[in-house]
Amino acid sequence: MRIATWNVNSLNARLPRVEEWVRYAEPDVLCMQETKVADATFPAMAFATLGYEAAHHGTGRWNGVAILSRIGMKDVTAGFADEGGSAAAEGRFVSALCGDVRVASVYVPNGRSVGSEHYQAKLDWLAELRTYLVQHCDPTTPLAVCGDFNVAPEDRDLYDPARFVGATHVSEPERKALAALEEWGLVDAFRQRYDEPGLFSWWDYRAGDFHQHRGMRIDLVLVTPPLADRVGFALIDRFARKGKLPSDHAPVLVDFDVD
């Protein structure tokens, strides 16, 4: 079973690139973030043509998360039950049962700057995600929480830790909030295969950062032990970050040896 995650940074701008990638990478499940489309305008038919069912949660201009599955989809949940009208929560969480695996696509708030109201909203959202896991999930069952977490788990996930001192994505509270998800029972699937530093999933569009290898690893596939024990091939597909009008993120895919 191949599960992938990709912050596509607007389906309106990048649908042909996503379709191309799906054709050659052939994920069984693809989680997408920053679709930047509303539910009513999500291109479900384009993906149906490729053999995928789709679930989407988004309101339009910003955010937006989706799950594509070619192995079935049921029991879809869009958003947290108690998120209300919070702007920080809109279009940031969707989950579905794909085959025998519960899959969630998440887009964690950016946080903007440490100490800002947006930063606190980010910490609150991560806490709400953990509450969701505690109340609705079981770490002894197959679960994959995939997406743009906007947190680099460790310094080895940064091209130069000194450049990020005092910034979001690396602060101690953010990393503690991510660690709390792992304490509940999630495992970084990519790190089951690769320990080395310098493996990134996001590069700023500016200043030639991609070509200079100045990136961060903030796109994660977090899984429960029943899946972590079955990780096979894993890849950050840098090829998809190249060419004309790419997203600033690369897809991350992980293969699992499941029936």
Image: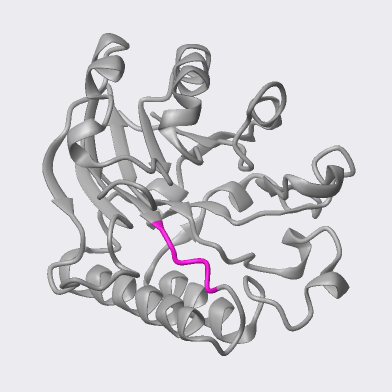
Does residue 185 sit above or below 244 in this rendering? Answer: below
Q: How many tags in the picture? A: 0
User: Does any portion of residue 99 appear in the rendered image?
Assistant: no
Residue under the image location 62 percent in, 52 percent down: 191
Is 122 contained in the magenta span? no
Q: In this image, 190 relative to 238: left or right?
A: left
What secondary structure prevails in the magenta region?
loop
Does residue 254 sit above or below 171 in this rendering? Answer: above
The N terminus appears in which quarter of the rendering?
top left
Q: Which residues are magenta?
A: 107-111
Does residue 78 sit above or below 8 in this rendering? Answer: below
Does residue 136 sit above or below 48 in this rendering? Answer: below
Q: In this image, 145 relative to 241: left or right?
A: left
Residue under the image location 35 percent in, 70 percent down: 88
Where residue 15 appears, as percent x and y from the top left, is 44, 23
Q: In this image, 200 relative to 93: left or right?
A: right
Where residue 32 appears, as percent x and y from the top left, is 40, 40
User: Does any portion of residue 245 appear in the rendered image?
Assistant: yes
